[in-house]
Image (cartoon, coloured by chain):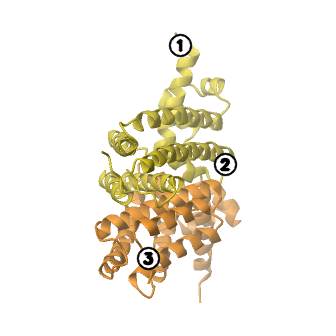
Chain colours: A yellow, B orange
Amino acid sequence: MKTKGKITREKILEAARELFNTKGFGATTISDLVEATGMQKGSLYFHFSGKDAIAREVLEEAAKKFMGFLGQALGGDNPGASIDNFFRCALDKHLAAGFVGGCIFGNTALEMSDSDPEFAGIIDRVFDEWIARIATVISEAQRTGQIRTDILSESLAKHIIATIEGGIMMSRLKKDERPMRECLDTLRVTLDLRVL
Amino acid sequence: MKTKGKITREKILEAARELFNTKGFGATTISDLVEATGMQKGSLYFHFSGKDAIAREVLEEAAKKFMGFLGQALGGDNPGASIDNFFRCALDKHLAAGFVGGCIFGNTALEMSDSDPEFAGIIDRVFDEWIARIATVISEAQRTGQIRTDILSESLAKHIIATIEGGIMMSRLKKDERPMRECLDTLRVTLDLRVL
């Protein structure tokens, strides 16, 4: 059973996650968190030392959740199908959110790369693991003849992730799924992706 | 000759541009601007009605400057060379800045897409013009046999811009040119770009 303290912490983290992702970390104040949770400021400070501590936990939880998502999304019948499935799951995920919020790692990367080395480090590790996991499946798909073999799997993995992040950015700006969908369709063609 | 008022306005805009791009718009306060410019708060408010008015002008100036950059970068000896030159100029631009700041339009897109429709609109028009100008050169390169023809020029243009934005994001996070450089090299191969 969850303790009352744990339930309160989760409530704070959930409100923070939503505020950071839509308003940005910098623009979110403790007062915003007080308003969103309906809690007293003192109660917030009882659970967390401040905004940074909340952000650190939000990012670490999001990272864990994202790795779980990645594991599921990459579970196709064959390596090419796994990449294709990952594309579909990524689009579905952002469609379900109505392209509000976008990718918390991409957002935080752009907002904090220059101002906060600690947060940049957390995000950097997420990107590195994301690249490594996609690259592993691409290597397998190259062996099974389902993806072009004239470019290294790691380069293709970075290329895919860059394109997805940029596609989310454009779809979020327009609140329209088409830019991201089109970027993924173009990737399928340029990768010579064969699903089998 | 520039009037004293114009010089002061430019000083404010320059400080704001740097703060917005490294700290983010949300995290930048009027006090930060007071500190960065060494001016009185009253003097800031004499020239601008507030942070939003400053941000609007920063974005509009950046858009004008970027379109000038794009015009130059896309001026190659032939359409394929223009695309290749644009890739090199984009990388050089961010290399020169040490991957600090990144792309002001990408940053603002991620920070303001959900919270500020007016700013999102300004950025959206920048992306639309960027896409249109790249697509025009790609169409020409497709006619001269310098870029693959099995994908529409507009889709390729969106794909290129998405990949560049994502590449900047990753290079900025690592303060390392390689992710962006690698993404551009991969694009050259996947587009079947021939420079002549």
Label 3 resides on the chain identified as B
Asked if disc 3 and disc 1 are in contact, CB closer than 8 Å, the reply is: no
Q: Residues within 10 Å of mark 2 (few under 14, many from 20)?
A: few
Residue B131, compared with residue B6, is above or below; it is above
The 10 Å Cα crowd at callout 3, few under 14, some 14 to 19, many 20 or more, is many
Instruction: Return the residue nearer the eye: A93 or B27.
Output: A93
Pointers 3 and 2 in contact (C-beta within 8 Å): no
> Which disc number belongs to residue B83?
3
* Gap between marks 3 and 2 measured at Cα: 34 Å
Crowd tier of the residue under label 1, counting other residues whose Cα lies within 10 Å: few below 14, some 14–19, many 20 or above: few
Determine which of the numbered discs, if any, sits on residue A2 in the image: 1
- Amino acid type for the residue under numbered disc 2: Asp
Q: Which of B110 and A139 is in front in this view?
A: A139
Mark 3 or mark 1, whichever is nearer to me: 3
In percent of width and height, residue B151 lies at 29, 66
Mark 2 lies on residue: A116
What residue appears at the point 61 percent right and 47 percent down from the top-left corner? A124
Q: Which amino acid does label 3 sit on?
A: Ile
Instruction: Relative to B84, say whether A59 is above or below.
Output: above
Residue B93 versus residue A136: which sits nearer the camera? A136
Q: Residue A70 carries which label?
A: none
In this orientation, does residue B29 appear? no
Report whether mark 3 lies on the same chain as mark 2: no
| x and y percentages locating residue A40 in the rendered image | 57, 25
**Which residue is located at x 65 percent, y 23 percent?**
A46
Looking at the rendering, which quadrant does residue B93 occupy? bottom right
Q: Do labels 3 and 1 share a chain?
A: no
Q: How far apart are marks 3 and 1 (CA)?
A: 57 Å
Q: Give the residue type at disc 1.
A: Lys
